[in-house]
Image (cartoon, helix red, strand yellow):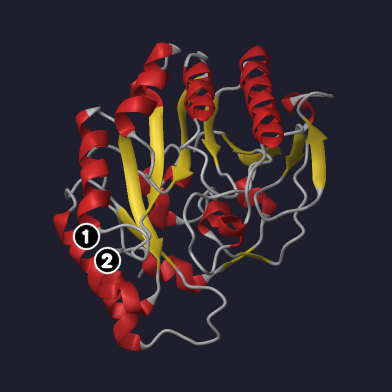
Amino acid sequence: MGKQIFYRGILDFCNYSCPYCPFSKKKESRRKLEQDQRQLFRFAREIGRQGFDGAVQIVPYGEALVHGYYWQGMAELSQCSGIQAVGAQSNFSFSVDKMIGIFAQYGGRKEKIRLWGTFHPDMTPVDEFLSRCELLQREGIRFCVGGVGVPDHIDVFTELRKRLGKDIYMWINKMDGSGRRYKEEEIKAFREIDPLFDLELHGFRADTEACRESFLIQGDGTIRSCVLCHQKIGDLYRGGLEQIRQKLCTRDRCSCYLAYGSRNDIAELAGFQPFPAFRIPAAGAFIQKKK
């Protein structure tokens, strides 16, 4: 497994208005966006200067790729010789032509882009979402897609799975906060869409030895063990990546894919190597169901 950095800036806004999401209820000021941009560019420069060898995945609180400066930042990261892959989570609501144009303008290397697209049935029709996927494919961009496993959305998720290319992996994240268990027929339906759905239901006891090749860096340079941990273990700008000798975990369990997706002890993730957190299968890889 390759080394992977998750990057999260101060952005906490989304252009969608899903009722369950806290980020849809906020508006970003110009001042905050400018600060977020400065932090992203500083991060990209520092990662290149320190010669990091691995992948960078942007995991914003909200939607980042509607902002052109994120594409500029990814372009700069993609030029670093040690960066093998760079990408972000997104709802795919951005203008593909415009943003790929910005990426190209700043010398980005498209073969390194890895995108994670979340489909929101309440916000985007299947046809519209698929059209953006097709545009990304024409540009040669590698990506995965998926959504939150809301039972009411099973039919539309099934339709999306049928219409996606077979080489595109579609994931389903478990639904949190609903206060009820999935019914057996719902689990079966989600398994048909995502052969690894059982991993979402299983949960994994936290183990820093199993995830020692990944960590989170925040916009101010704070380094944490993962997206779920609050313990600071270093500072990118004061000591750098080399200072990290030991990971500390404040959680009992890895309760989301961004936590357990970077572990080296889950056999079912082998098809996503060398950077399983992107959820993009390697060429010719077989996605193994959990037994």
Q: For the point 60% across and 49% down, which residue is it?
A: 61
| Above or below for 199 versus 83 | below
1 and 2 marks in contact (CB < 8 Å): yes
Residue 37 quadrant: top right
Residue of label 1? 161
At 68% from the left and 51% from the top, the residue drawn is: 208
Image-quadrant location for residue 97 = top left
Q: Nearer the viewer, residue 56 or 19?
A: 19
**Residue under circle 2?**
157
| x then y, percent, for residue 41 | 63, 21
Q: Which image quadrant: the C terminus? A: bottom left
Residue 284 visible to an observer of this rendering: yes
Depth check: 25 or 151 in front?
Answer: 25
Is residue 37 toward the left or the right of residue 82 in the image? Answer: right
Disc 2 marks a residue whose amino acid type is Phe
Residue 276 occupies quadrant: top left
Residue 275, horizontal then vertical, whole percent? 46, 39
Q: Residues within 10 Å of mark 2 (few under 14, many from 20)?
A: many
Q: Is mark 2 on a helix, strand or loop?
A: helix
Q: Is residue 52 left or right of residue 142?
A: right
